[in-house]
Amino acid sequence: MTKTAIITGAMGGIGYAAAQLLTQNGFHVVGMDIVTADACADRIAALGENFVYISGNLADASDRQALLDTALSHFGAVHALVNVAGVAPKFRRDLLEMTEESYDFVMDINTKGTLFLSQLVANQILKQEDRDAVGNRGYIVNISSCSAYTSSTSRGEYCVSKAGVSMVTMLFADRLAGEGIPVNEICPGIIATGMTAVVKEKYDKLIAEGLVPQARWGLPEDIAKAILSLVDGTLGYTTGQSLIVDGGMHIRRL
């Protein structure tokens, strides 16, 4: 059985690396991102015939439905959802100066969009009879962040949104465990993506000073490998887990 995966944020660093790795491992992939197809035509073409792209905003219910409809019209079923799409605040502000507009912008995509796309896709998977070699109907993987449990007072809305993703993961894992749909999250550390490029100098210094025990930036490919293990059945008896991929940054050291 050829599996079909939906990936949001598919043209960004982690999402694109995941799309590459999954297509290389036999998945059909339907990707969505906010950018137009024309603006990322080369990247789309490089993913080959097993990849289909749709431009859309995860915060928009009609775009979420269009994403699912695209997957079904091309491949007939969905077996995995990888919620990568996420945004940082447009401007970093002290917590005491954070605006409601910024909070709503971040939460609508990172948390609300993730929650309701998971709901939509889970209901579709429940309609399908297919089971894989380990007996599961499908898989959901959410990309959270070390910011779900690490305070950054200059981007509080982002931290709150990712803590919300962690609870979304737990809730769906609980609800769907008996339905054969494992739900897990990955918490990346400092990953070299467009989002972190604007603070590269800051993190270069922190890594050099020992913040990350493995002493390097994480790569989108590091996260993609973790995603693959959670959607191909390798970790099929795992649900409700947070897989921390951060080079050891979470270790408390004296």
Image: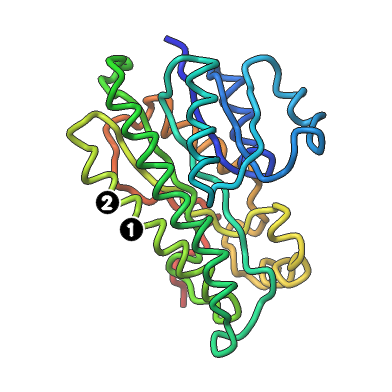
Amino acid of disc 2: Leu
Element type at mark 1:
helix
Residue at the image point whose x is 50% and y is 66% from the top: 147
Q: Front-most of 76 and 202? A: 76
Image position, residue 184 (x, y; %): 36, 44
- Report the side of 137 relative to 205 (left or right): left
Residue at the image point whose x is 82% and y is 29% from the top: 42
- Taking the view exactly as shown, the residue that stands out farthest to the front is 62
Image position, residue 159 (x, y; %): 49, 69
Residue at the image point whose x is 54% and y is 45% from the top: 84
Q: Front-most of 100 and 188? A: 100
- Report the side of 55 relative to 150 (left or right): right
The answer to the question of whether label 1 and label 2 lie on touching residues, with beta carbons closer than 8 A, is yes
Residue at the image point whose x is 69% and y is 39% from the top: 11
Q: Front-most of 182 and 118? A: 118
- Taking the view exactly as shown, the residue that stands out farthest to the top is 1
When the figure is inspected, residue 237 is found, relative to residue 28, above or below; the finding is below
- Taking the view exactly as shown, the residue that stands out farthest to the bottom is 96
Element type at mark 2:
helix
- Residue assigned mark 2: 171
Q: CA distance from mark 1 to mark 2?
A: 6 Å
Image position, residue 202 (x, y; %): 73, 72
Amino acid of disc 1: Met
Disc assigned to residue 10: none
When the figure is inspected, residue 129 is found, relative to residue 109, above or below; the finding is above
- Taking the view exactly as shown, the residue that stands out farthest to the left is 178
Q: Residues within 10 Å of mark 1 (few under 14, many from 20)?
A: some
- Residue assigned mark 1: 167
| On-image quarter of the N terminus | top left
Q: Quadrant of residue 155?
A: bottom right
